Image (cartoon, coloured by chain):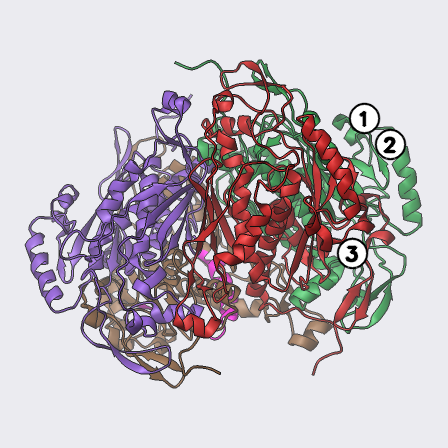
Chain colours: A red, B green, C purple, D brown
Amino acid sequence: MSHNTFGHLFRVTTWGESHGPALGCVVDGCPPGIPLTEADIQPWLDRRRPGQGKFVTQRQEPDAVRILSGVFQDAQTDARHGGQVTTGTPISMIIDNVDQRSRDYSEIATAFRPGHADYAYFAKYGVRDYRGGGRQSARETAARVAAGAIARKIVAGVTLRAAVVQIGPHAVADDRIDFSVTGDNPFWAPDPDIVPVWEEHLEKVRKAGSSTGAIVAVEASGVPAGWGAPLYGKLDAELAGALMSINAAKGVEIGAGFAAAALSGEANADEMRMGNDGPVFLSNQAGGVLGGISTGQPVTARVAFKPTSSILTPRMSVNEAGEEIELRTKGRHDPCVGIRAVPVVEAMVACVLADAFLRHRAQTGGEAFQPGPPRG
Amino acid sequence: MSHNTFGHLFRVTTWGESHGPALGCVVDGCPPGIPLTEADIQPWLDRRRPGQGKFVTQRQEPDAVRILSGVFQDAQTDARHGGQVTTGTPISMIIDNVDQRSRDYSEIATAFRPGHADYAYFAKYGVRDYRGGGRQSARETAARVAAGAIARKIVAGVTLRAAVVQIGPHAVADDRIDFSVTGDNPFWAPDPDIVPVWEEHLEKVRKAGSSTGAIVAVEASGVPAGWGAPLYGKLDAELAGALMSINAAKGVEIGAGFAAAALSGEANADEMRMGNDGPVFLSNQAGGVLGGISTGQPVTARVAFKPTSSILTPRMSVNEAGEEIELRTKGRHDPCVGIRAVPVVEAMVACVLADAFLRHRAQTGGEAFQPGPPRG
Amino acid sequence: MSHNTFGHLFRVTTWGESHGPALGCVVDGCPPGIPLTEADIQPWLDRRRPGQGKFVTQRQEPDAVRILSGVFQDAQTDARHGGQVTTGTPISMIIDNVDQRSRDYSEIATAFRPGHADYAYFAKYGVRDYRGGGRQSARETAARVAAGAIARKIVAGVTLRAAVVQIGPHAVADDRIDFSVTGDNPFWAPDPDIVPVWEEHLEKVRKAGSSTGAIVAVEASGVPAGWGAPLYGKLDAELAGALMSINAAKGVEIGAGFAAAALSGEANADEMRMGNDGPVFLSNQAGGVLGGISTGQPVTARVAFKPTSSILTPRMSVNEAGEEIELRTKGRHDPCVGIRAVPVVEAMVACVLADAFLRHRAQTGGEAFQPGPPRG
Amino acid sequence: MSHNTFGHLFRVTTWGESHGPALGCVVDGCPPGIPLTEADIQPWLDRRRPGQGKFVTQRQEPDAVRILSGVFQDAQTDARHGGQVTTGTPISMIIDNVDQRSRDYSEIATAFRPGHADYAYFAKYGVRDYRGGGRQSARETAARVAAGAIARKIVAGVTLRAAVVQIGPHAVADDRIDFSVTGDNPFWAPDPDIVPVWEEHLEKVRKAGSSTGAIVAVEASGVPAGWGAPLYGKLDAELAGALMSINAAKGVEIGAGFAAAALSGEANADEMRMGNDGPVFLSNQAGGVLGGISTGQPVTARVAFKPTSSILTPRMSVNEAGEEIELRTKGRHDPCVGIRAVPVVEAMVACVLADAFLRHRAQTGGEAFQPGPPRG
């Protein structure tokens, strides 16, 4: 993982600013022969797309993805694969920026918005595209979602599901989480009962010109034992880095996470029995990862997102001239960025898993060893 | 970060198993001309060393480090630098394993200890050095601490301090944290009042043959604005990956972390005023990082550690033959691995910062831009 | 260097096929504040452009580059930098494919052209975009040239000049090489006297439907001492890898190169004297690199290019069905690919040097040590 | 490939100076379950060892390698694998420096030996271990040979053979090369008839206190089609970088190499027919690589080595004080470093191939597609 490239063998390089002509990514290292058209990618982008409800930004972006390279279709591929497939060469994807509303940015052109990366970018680079946040904008996550759509096809046996499990102080109880219902409400809530609570909370937040944080949970089931590699390519370490790289993320935990600190060894270590297809665990405090390697259990993680930094309340700040100022951040903003992070969290987990799968296959051939009676 | 190498420009490659002849690391990319002898490294290793109290493992390891390459001293360097310095070539360090107690490992040779990586290693590799956990042993962290000692010298302006802030359910209140007192007690506690509480808790845990989790907080002050690089080399993302790669880590948070989820935008976004030496922040919910780039505020993080998996209580498990078994993990173990993780957390933060500094200097020359009246 | 990304800190990721909608690259790690518009890049692409003479392919491609990200211009940057500059974020560049002549590719759709990578791509990937060679087409080098244009701006003190020094059996004598005249003829010849010889040779080759090889020499003057890093990031090793990655390259040599094998130690080792600005060398057999590190002398290299594999003579081959066939490669082809490689060789050297400069600045701060009387 | 680490998935990190206590390497990414003891590595080191004849340095080094990690043997592995095997964790190998003759280095402590990297190291780092060349010493290649011994086991189906094919002006004719006889003479000569010629030449060189260059040819047969990855991970590009990273290398060519420049397209492009096991080529000008991907033919390369820079003839130079001096390099030196490079060339090719194999397996699963009648 380095600057704008994510991954080792499944490598995603993203580019683009919020108000430039376009954004996109190049996916390198994808195995050949995988069926892939824009129609495989667009649905995931549509899930992330802004303008879909009153609690997300009203910017209207179709986010239509075009594939510019790395796929091929002809009579041969039709005969062999039934349509357009990846060729093993880099897949370039582009998403035009359409709704760059022509507004007056002069107010923030030289001001550092509190909670934003404006000052940090200025201090590092001495120049920054402030329009809509430039490179720090969450629009960049569209490229991650596009890449994640390809990653999903590489690890097709894995089922990836994320949900918002807390907005502001209102959390879903662990035993109420049902990933199958997240599509039924605009919050990716895994519990229908929390929906009115969150609606009321967000309405209050929105009216106050304020914002609120959130927590997203993600579960990847169907990950076989053996993915990940100690010590600095641990699966959980790479998940932590990948998830923390999402805009506004402030915390990541795997399995029991921070709660593990308060547990006893007996409560924490997952016991094992033999099942029909290998060992089974009687609990999943580990979140599917031990020693940085997957165990075959569902890989589970949670990510904390801070509240949107753009709020209407006037805030103290400074500007590039070193003057003290007061600043309200107008514009179209999500009151809770955590909601739209759900497809992004899934995409990052998909990318990490695809990369881990390829590296595992490289080193070992890809098969997991299973306990059993001595062979031969 | 890949398998057993950590970092991009400040690169640390570690090797070694718990019960092999030695362990060590190779540090590549270190700037030349930095004074360095074993005496600069040994004190940090001594802080991590086992056998220092009844709540840490009784294994007696001197952990004496030897530098095998990458430094030089002669009359010239004495005249120029006042002693032995780094040469810019790879620094190889080795620590002999001394107290590999010859015991009978037959019980765990084919058994998968619950909560350990035994099964994961077996599934991935089909072969594993089970003696003392082999490569998954926390002994590997000695190599991290040695590398961290060098990293500290590269970012000499940074003050790095970690402390245990929670053991089991017993947490230190935020406003009680005083990093200057952590050396006064065997728990790296930043609050003397918590010491008797933890002693009692650990005594109970130890007598029960059980174990307990912990949370470690770390603060790096003196980090200038501008370190870190969006988007996948974000400073906080790299910290998250690095800290999660430590044995037994289950969660990482930056600044307000998971608590940010419950905050309003007003409470979360740190306001700014002008100080004598540039902008100052009126709070530090961000933990010193915005958009993945340091802001000049202290960089703060917290890491959750699960309870030691080796406990005396019999636990259900399986073995390599696929048989169901009951297992008690005898041997010398820390009842709370989080305690000895404190120097390791500091070391990993030091490595991340040294790497970020070098990459920042590469891209920009190393100086931060500062707001002020127009120049010229 | 990995798959489709070149470089460590100055990183170039290229994508695109010969007959896809477009090709391009993403340049990551560029320092901020460097003036950059399309007008800085287009001239270098124009030098590489096809359709410029009877000895290069007649495909007509404007090769117009567009920058999609990573640059910014507003009143602030105008005041500070005098126009649009790099922002330190990834620079995405795109070049549309315009003249993808709609022809019948059915003949080569399943045939392996001798000397081409058709069979190798098939064996590796099982699927390939055969139109115009797909990813193996030399059109990809347009992206390298675009990236090289940016690299040149990073190492602005370096003067980079390449020339064709041999076509077929006809070589320019070493003492006749004058890089300043290469622009005066269509062959990038550094000696006007060779031009009629090459013209006659190429006319014969063209009429015979054949092709011919070539050697390109390159010289980078103004490289300060200290760039490059032993042992596997040696400047000459990276040049060798970079130059050998160009289509049709079969050999690379640095300084005296293969001729050094026949030299004595006295003839080979360049002696030194003190000049006004530090040591000077009395010869340059080393090609400006010793131990993988630049010495301040001009960095010199030569690259051998094989003859174009597409020729009109019928050749024996096989096809995907495993049938033996005879094949003539029709279409628009350069009879000597080495000619158009000249700007590509320069671009690759520029990228290697920019990357070496950034890595050197990272590790050492960027200044070279110079011999002289003791300081202080 | 970066600084002191070579490779992407099969990663070799080397360390150590000529006159430090030891040198060694860490091999990461090795597949598990490969039988490996010191006895598998030592023979390759013995081939490279100094002190074996009057035309190589008289330094006496046993070069005894010890494996410190990454292998395991117990009853289980004995039962499964028949002895000690790799575990998939990093393999640390160490070779003690024994014969660091205590001599007076004061003469070269501040002088820059012509043709050596002394000045380049000084300019870059400002400090250097000059004893025996420090890090620039060819002793480092022992670590490469040790790593290569492991690489060979990963690509066990490949037969790797190198030979000296030219010493000074005396070359072996291509049709006289017989790799099977290289072990019968002290020069790794593939033609017995050249031996007396070289002996006479070297004797003259030695008596004159001079040195001479050489060319080494290498052939890897048994490489299946499909290894290597366009565009910047091309197999030939990686071979070029790897071979050029060897001490004293000045040129690398693949297949026909520089001679290809003078060829016609008809003479250069290798024609194909169907054999019993897939396509066969009627010639091998390509050197087994097309488009950066192996074709199944033998991979062939040649490397040019400059004459040893340490010679007894007084040479003009300068020193750290900026004074002009005359310098003779006394000490124990090979008059022709190319001879002892033979096992190193083999080792580097082995490492490149092992890395290419693992990356190929990662992306594609590892099987090559073969032409044939439609399946199914």
Q: Is residue A12 above or below residue B279?
A: below
Residue type at mark 3 is Asn
Q: Residue at x 12, y 53 (%)?
A: C173
Q: Position of residue C278 (x, y in %)?
A: 30, 31
* Helix, strand or loop at mark 1: helix
Q: Residue at x 63, y 45 (%)?
A: A243
Q: Is residue C227 visible?
A: yes
Question: Mark 2 sits on what residue?
Answer: B194
Q: Is residue D148 magenta?
A: yes
Tag 2 or tag 1, which sits nearer the N-term? 1
Which residue position holds label 3? A284
Rounded to the nearest angstrom, the CA distance separating label 1 from label 3 is 34 Å
Q: How much space separates mark 1 and mark 2, taking CA atoms?
A: 10 Å
Q: CA distance from mark 2 to mark 3?
A: 31 Å
With D86 as the anchor, is D350 left or right in this view?
left
Q: Secondary structure at mark 3?
A: loop
Residue occupying the far bottom of the picture: D276
The residue under the point 23% across, 70% down is C329
Label 3 chain ID: A
Label 1 sits on residue:
B176
Q: Which residues are magenta?
A: D141-164
Answer yes or no: do the residues labelled 1 and 2 have beta carbons within 8 Å? yes
Q: Nearer the viewer, mark 2 or mark 3?
A: 3
Question: As shown in the figure, which amino acid type bears the numbered disc 2?
Answer: Ile
Give the numbered dot on residue B344: none
Nearer to us: label 1 or label 3: 3
Q: Chain of mark 1?
A: B
Q: Residue D364: image x %, image y %? A: 50, 67
Q: Is residue C271 visible?
A: no
Q: Are marks 2 and 3 on the same chain?
A: no
